[in-house]
Amino acid sequence: MKIRIYKEVQIDACHRLLHYNGKCSSLHGHRWKIEVWVEGEPERTTHILIDYNAIKEIVGKYDHQTILNADDPMAPCIEKFQRVITTPGDPTSELLALLLRNDLNTYCKEQGIDATIPRIKVWESPNSYAELRLED
């Protein structure tokens, strides 16, 4: 029996787009809303597919963080004062959707959870989001 669950997590984080010519090339913050759908076979004894808190923790690693392209010369400067999460490219909502899906898939595999992430949305404002679907 396949089950699909949904979890919404909100985080606050700042980023900048190194290879973008516009306002987003400056360091700035967002209240990000992350929507995650997980689908699979629940565990037989507990009937739980994945703990909602596990999703919150995986997404939460980005909460109150500075997220920068690994090539961004600003990263080493900021790291002198606080942690920086670096990404393999500009930390757009599109890339964050992919990275979060990968993190969630890795967690499921490590925990022996028979699940996939068929859909994830990363909102960087109330009217702008990137959506990644399994078929993408």
Image: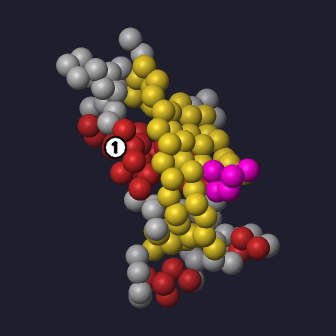
Examine the rendered structure and indicate whether residue 55 appears above or below residue 24: above
Q: Quadrant of the N terminus?
A: top left
Instruction: Give the vertical position of 3 relative to 21 (above or below).
Output: above
Amino acid at dot 1:
Asn
How far across and down, in percent of the image, does residue 100 sit?
A: 48, 49
Q: Residue at x 41, y 39 (%)?
A: 105
Q: Residue at x 68, y 78 (%)?
A: 26
Note whether 85 is above or below 136 in the view shown: below
Colour basis:
secondary structure
Q: Is residue 3 visible?
A: yes
When asked about the image quadrant of residue 49, the answer is: top left
**Residue at image coords 60%, 49%:** 122
The location of residue 110, given as percent across then percent down, is 28, 40
Q: Give the farthest residue toward the left.
A: 45
Counting the numbered discs, the total is: 1
* In the image, farthest residue toward the top: 1
Query: Camera-side residue: 37 or 71?
Result: 37
Q: Quadrant of the C terminus?
A: top right
Q: Looking at this view, name the residue that lies furthest to the right.
A: 22
Dominant secondary structure of the residues highlighted in magenta in the image: strand
Give the structural element (helix, strand or loop) at label 1: helix
Mark 1 = which residue?
53
**Residue 111 appears left or right of 25:** left
Q: Quadrant of residue 23?
A: bottom right
Q: Can see residue 94?
A: no
Residue 60 picture location, percent across and down:
41, 56
Q: Viewer-proximal residue, 34 or 104?
A: 34
> Residue, x 33% and y 44% (percent of image)?
54
Q: Which residues are magenta?
A: 123-127
